[in-house]
Amino acid sequence: MPGSGFERAPWATDPGASRGRLFAEPASPLRTPYQRDRDRLVHSTAFRRLKYKTQVFVYHEGDHYRTRLTHTLEVAQVARSIARALTLDEDLTEALALAHDVGHPPFGHAGERALDRAMAAHGGFDHNGQSLRVVTRLECRYAEFDGLNLTWETLEGLVKHNGPLTDREGRTIGRYAEKGLPHSIEVYRGQQDLMLWSQPSLEAQIAGIADDIAYDSHDIDDGIRAGLFGLQDLREVPFVAAIIDEVDRTYPGLEQPRRIHEMLRRLLTRMIEDVIAETRRRLGEAQPASAEDVRLAGHPLAGFSGSMAEADRTIKAFLFRRMYREAGVTAVMENAQAIVADLFARYRDDPAAMGEDRLRGIDRTDAGRFARRIADYIAGMTDRFAIDEHRRLFDDTPELR
């Protein structure tokens, strides 16, 4: 197997034993299946668009704030570091980290909420389901198939990186218990069984927790840059307060930018080291002999220790109060939702507003398919393109500041 000349743990995903692709392709003489998946994602249109999609602030708030692209790269770096320490398949882990947000619409979760409301009568909108739709259908680059034709393991991990979606009998659980499976996942499972009831691979579990770690670190950084809170305010979080005290003892009188960075790098390191230690502990208890044993474990084998899970909760609670629900941020996001809602309504009532290319192949007699096509178009927009489209079609585009 090309590129596979290092020792993997028995519970790691083996690229030589991949369940393959929906459309069979010859093996690469130079790359493993998961290296090819990673490379296809990096070269995809959806991945490039992440550069101009919002993380928390809209794109023109400043060059130093995170976008979906910089967030994704930070998740990939954290995930790969953990995967290496646990001797997992690093390429699969990285591919999953790179893929996890490709379905996000413009304006982050604000755009997602607006599209979900607009699509309420047609199965709703979910960014995780849209990510699957992007890589299995909407990327049209290859002569022989739609989508990127990723391996089963990458598709499984993309859908389940936050855990199983159903129980063994097919009943939805967790965040999908009430609303059911996202439309795109429901449709796709008729083509390929991704074992929605089982735990994901360890590589997918690591990608999921790396997302949490990256959020905690970079949203603290962005919140400080935006002036929403300072280091003194962060002392409300005991875990962070202890790190600030450690930095101040080690480097008394350190200037503020370096002080902030020293705090953030220690926070990242502690969280990464905790995941590695706790995952090793759980693996020692469970003794899985294969990646399949990980899927059948009945509970996640990767995760934070109890004390770090509490620290993670307190950080997220602080950020929720001081950043995500801060009055100025909320006002901007409400305006962003209005832009998405306006665009959806306009395209629905006047399909020609999308342009001739977008009208090709649309069946307007099928309301659900037509609405899904509109949602696909809007979800693929960058923040700035959505704003420009709104200005083209409306006279009262709100300022997102």
Image (tube, grey):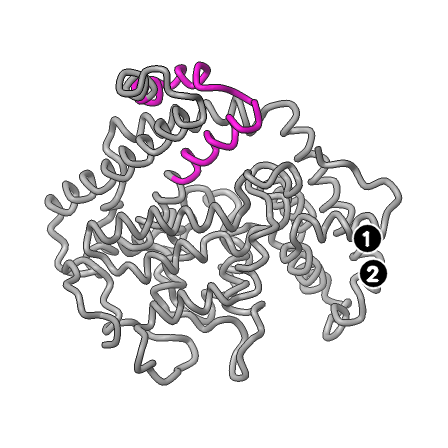
Q: In this view, does 292 lie to the left or right of 219?
A: left
Indicate the quadrant containing the N terminus: top left, top right, bottom left or bottom right: bottom left
Q: Is mark 2 on a helix, strand or loop?
A: helix
Q: Classify 10 Å Cα crowding around label 1: few (below 14), some (14-19), many (20 and above).
A: some
Q: In this view, does 274 lie to the left or right of 326?
A: left
Q: Where is residue 188 in the image (x, y as percent from the top left)?
A: 49, 66
Q: Nearer the viewer, residue 316 or 219?
A: 219
Q: Main secondary structure of the magenta part?
A: helix
Q: What's the mark number on residue 353?
A: 2
Q: In this view, does 281 lie above or below 324?
A: below
- Of circles 1 and 2, which is in front? 2
Indicate the quadrant containing the C terminus: top left, top right, bottom left or bottom right: top right
Q: Is residue 45 above or below residue 168?
A: below
The Cα atoms of the two marked residues, 1 and 2, are separated by 7 Å
**Residue type pointed to by label 1:** Arg
Q: Which of 176 and 374 is in front in this view?
A: 374
Q: Where is residue 160 in the image (x, y as percent from the top left)?
A: 38, 53
Q: What element carries label 1?
A: helix
Disc 1, disc 2: CB below 8 Å? yes
Residue 353 falls within the magenta-colored stretch: no
Q: Position of residue 199 (x, y in %)?
A: 30, 52
Q: In which quarter of the image is residue 21?
A: bottom left
Residue 229 falls within the magenta-colored stretch: yes
Give the residue at x 45% y 69%.
Answer: 40
Give the residue at x 32% y 61%.
Answer: 92
Q: In which quarter of the image is residue 56?
A: top right
Residue labelled with disc 1: 346
**Which residue is at the far right?**
395
Q: In which quarter of the image is residue 365?
A: bottom right
Magenta residue span: 214-243
Q: Where is residue 196 in the image (x, y as percent from the top left)?
A: 37, 57
